[in-house]
Image (cartoon, helix red, strand yellow):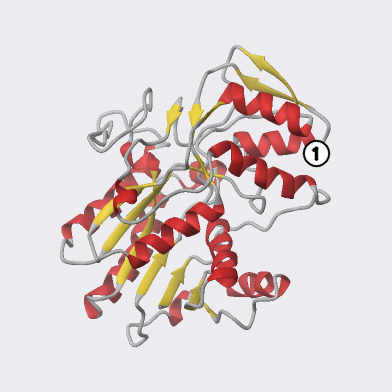
Amino acid sequence: MRIAILGATSQIARDLLLSFSAQDDHDILLYARRPEALTSWLHEHEIQDRYPVAGFSAFVVEEQFDAIINFVGVGNPVQTAALGIAIIKLTSEFDELALRYLSHHPRCRYLFLSSGAVYGTGFDKPVDEQTRAEVPINQMQSHDWYALAKLQAECRHRALSDQAIIDIRVFNYFSASQDMTTRFLMGDIVCAIQDNAVLHTSSDYMVRDYLHPSDFHRMITALLLAPPTNTAVDCYSKALIDKPTLLITMQEKFGLRFDMVPVTTGFNATGKKPHYYSLNRRAGRLGYEPELTSLEGLCREMNIIMSKPKQSVFSSTDTKNTDGARARK
């Protein structure tokens, strides 16, 4: 299959590329705002000969693709807050780039990386197939722009009902390769362990469903092979994890020191989400079956992190980080 990846410098896209390079023989072209940074990363992983790299200006309708995967987005909550309403323009610009291509090549599939934030709810309970998106139209706040950008994109896609477009709503994702300094819970846990510091975290109860890179690759593969359809799917692992279990496991397995404080101590650019996950299993009907639980995936990546010396992590404005839970040490 010949695939175009837009926003290929994103961390989740790079994880997918590593999975593709090890398991698949797709013909993949990479497009990014900073092609030189991506080329350097490909050399680092010795796959520079596998994937051609170009700027977005090289993405033209004359190319022939079987699928487009769009990863363009915001890298972390600080960037989300800094961009504000500009995230709507950014999302629309690159979404329209892909949609223009589809207007010339209607048989091409389009996978769009959306977010669980598209539901716009307070996530006091998990979402499911019956959950309605909520937009606080009269009380818009800075964290609503990100959700609205994704919602607008999904609305555009559903309007093109004859096109094979699937929106992939990522809720929580963790990889050993992501930037651990961007103020999300697992990143703070990693930094606290590496710095031998105490993690001060909110006592607020929360439940998460962390997707492992291998299961993300498993989902993408299933969607590329599924019959053409126009829909949205929610990401999920084999099993959830709550915050107390997560902290205790990190303490027992990796030496995390932590204390719980009665007030929220974190920075959350997309709103507070005690149950930020989905019970929607539509992806399963399209062939996706997760292999790892949240805990298994987290421990697998933590073992990788702890086996290496602490180092800075490549990141960019293309990077997609969707943990959904933020806290500071």
Q: Quadrant of the C terminus?
A: top right
Residue at the image point whose x is 65% and y is 76% from the top: 47
| Left or right: 7, with 182 as reference point | left
As drawn, 26 above or below 137: below
Q: Is residue 93 visible?
A: no
Instruction: Tell me where residue 219 appears, x and y as whole percent.
Output: 42, 56
Q: Nearer the viewer, residue 79 or 190?
A: 190
| Left or right: 103, with 306 as reference point | left
As drawn, 220 above or below 208: below
- The mark total stands at 1
Q: Quadrant of residue 193?
A: top right
As drawn, 2 above or below 45: below
Residue at the image point whose x is 73% and y is 27% from the top: 251
**Is disc 1 surrounded by few (<14), some (14 to 19) or many (20+) residues within 10 Å?**
some
Q: Quadrant of residue 131?
A: top left
From the image, tell me which residue sits under label 1: 194
Q: Is residue 206 visible?
A: yes
Instruction: Tell me where residue 36 appears, x and y as whole percent.
Output: 63, 75
Q: Amino acid at mark 1?
A: Gln
Element at label 1: helix
Q: Quadrant of the N terminus?
A: bottom left
Specify the farthest residue to the top.
Answer: 262
Residue at the image point whose x is 64% and y is 79% from the top: 48
Residue at the image point whose x is 42% and y is 50% from the top: 289
Instruction: Tell me where residue 78 appears, x and y as whole percent.
Output: 56, 42
Instruction: Tell me where residue 290 appears, x and y as whole percent.
Output: 46, 48
Q: Quadrant of residue 244?
A: top right
